[in-house]
Amino acid sequence: MLEPGDQIDIWVVEQALGQGGMGSVYRCHNKNAQRIKAAIKVLDPSLNRIATAQARFIREAEILFALEHPNIVKVRNVRMDAELPYLEMEFVEGKNLEDRIFDGALDFDDALPLLKQAASALKYMHDCGIRHRDIKPSNIILQSDGTLKLVDFGIATEQDGKTITESGQNFGSVSYAPPEWIEPDDLDPVKWDVYSLGVVFYELLTGRFGFPISGIGTSRQKALQVMIAKQSHPPLDPGGHLPVDLRTLVRAMTRSDPAERMSDAEAICTYLDELDLERVDDDASFADEPEFRPTAPTWYPGIEGTGETMVPDSEALEAAAAEILAGAKKKKVEPDPAKAQKKTEPAPVSPVVEKKVEPAPPPPPVADPVPEPAGSKAPLIATAVVLLGLAGGAAWWFTQEPPVEAPTDRDVAVIVTGVAADVPLTVTLDGTPGTANGTKWGFDATALGPHKVQVVVGEDCTDEAAWCGRFDQKVVVARGDGAQTETVAVTAPTARDVVVSAPGVKRKATLKLAGQEVELAKGEGTVTAVLPGRYEGVLDAGADQAKQELIVPWGDGPVTWELDIELAAEVKTSGGGGTTTDTTPTAATTAAKSPVSNASFSAWLGSHADWQRDAAIEASKADGNYLKGWDGATPPAGKESQAIVNVSWSAANAYCSGRGGLAALDAAPTTWSESSSSPWHEYRQNDGKPAWRRSDGGVSTNVGRSDTRAFIGFRCAK
């Protein structure tokens, strides 16, 4: 699995959304535009060289790209030539219905529009020849505007039964798969989707799970328990407090016998358009549907009144699970061609009968087991396995506790983007600092619900520190697995010029500030490119020195600083006359050498082959624009005397390493006229870190070491 901050082509991973047999899905943002989001499905690296796997991956993209429906997630692109082949899908921001079910029952007038949207998406998909086969609450996203989106087609099939992608599981989630799931030859994928949607809608209306997974036994045992409970279960009824027509629809979608089940999504849509939502009758009964269909005894002799629960034989249950699941995997689904060619008629919905049905009496106790007759061992073992499975499953079903209380908190990871890893910052959630790991900050056990994340950029940042940048972002911690990842985009601090005014200084003096020395002529001067922070300025006038604190606040543009310092003119008498001379030494900024030419850089490349184009790009010391038009160490014809461009900061720094280093950010010239011998920008260094200066005097310290541009040259200090 990829981690937050990892890159997939132009996409930067924010959070893992899920994993399957063909690969994993991640929430990502575009590296150049962080507000552009996408869900990126990456082909598993182990399948990257397998032609059939690539073909399935591409086929999924082709089919899903053609689906145009407001309630189906959209596939936008596929990139098989990327280092990690991937599908690009729209990112759906919202809450999945599984989380919504944990919050409790939804009012039917709120739930009904969701069912209509889901049924519309299902009908459209079926009309296009696609069957989803994994409809469940976690695969349905509800956006804040009420729009529902169906996602995850990992085990979808085409109309001919061909699987689009090959998942690690061959069937949908057990809690939402129909009872005929264990008999692949009888599976109708359309009826499968209808049943699954019926279970989902039942859960939305009741706020409880229709077929929760037991916490007892192995995974196979748990799956088998659920499927046994489904084999002859009564239709799911969301409750007498709801409109009778609504109950009838849910019951028709969740009948255990597929022959009696509502036929397809079109029938659901038609029925939804004609619902009578006014009639509510808690005593209404459904004549052709028994309220309970016992399939086997749920108690053994002597257990009555003891409060015990029947515990299935784990070995027999394991064997039965293995046999059923193995058989299901070996049998290929071959739908009836006739079904694929003709439209099935909607199955009739059960009529409502105005009478009350008495509940069926409990099943009788099981008689003592009959001794095994000679020669009949195999049939009896099979019967015993099924009986044990049914009894265990039924006992579990009728004694199952309500779903475990949902968690009330979740870990949160905040990733800060927009600044380099060495920029000092602090991240807090509701005022509490997190644990730092580079630009990723962790917060443990955060309560579900709304919170405020604040990123403060700068050193020694108290609430009153004006030199610090503050970035606030509201987040909502939602229920889910693993840490919830949030991305906060900030901006790097901007270097600002400090315009100095010292009216009390009457003679020449040098101001030392932020590592720079600037001569004050007539009490005025400018210190360039000072980052926000707190500084101590030192005014040096020979034997006299004075200090004053300066705060450069966060922001843009020049900062005006007036020094409250008095230095009278120094008078020196020579001979008998009185002459006034300034004895304070002048400290001028040292000028840098001329811009480096193509010819000079070419001569250097001759003995530094590792900085020639291909080698530097391969070593990630430069990007693809580096030395465009060069042939090894030879510059483009006719441009030997021109100033070099298309170099990276790292290359410029390496060239100047024996020449006093790159020119300082404040070194003269600070402005110049652009020409073939003076590029528009020049790489400089600011305390050894990347920077550039523009011909009009503008500066920046937000410079990448491998960045290469056609308008940037450089000059060395010597």
Image: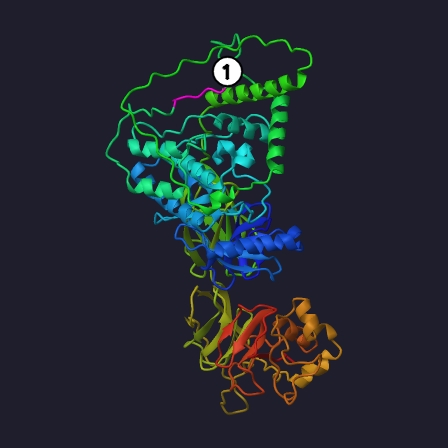
526, 712: nearer the viewer: 712
111, 651: nearer the viewer: 111
Residue lying at 50% horizontally and 16% vertically, measured from the top left? 298
Residue lying at 61% horizontally and 55% vertically, measured from the top left? 54
- Of all residues shown, which one is farthest toward the right? 607
Residue type at tag 1: Pro
Residue lying at 47% horizontally and 60% vertically, measured from the top left? 34
Q: Is residue 333 covered in magenta?
A: no
Residue 460 seen anywhere in this rendered image of the structure: no
**Which of the 4 image quarters holds residue 503?**
bottom left
Image vertical order of residue 575 relative to residue 431, above or below: below
* Few, some or many residues within 10 Å of mark 1 (<14, 14–19, 20+): some
Magenta stretch mostly in which secondary structure? Answer: loop
Image vertical order of residue 393 relative to residue 577, above or below: above
Q: Is residue 292 covered in magenta?
A: yes
453, 502: nearer the viewer: 453
Give percent across and percent down for residue 364.
47, 11
To which residue does mark 1 refer? Answer: 297
Residue 672 seen anywhere in this rendered image of the structure: yes
Image vertical order of residue 714 relative to residue 618, above or below: below
Give percent across and percent down for residue 430.
42, 46
Give percent across and percent down for residue 538.
51, 70
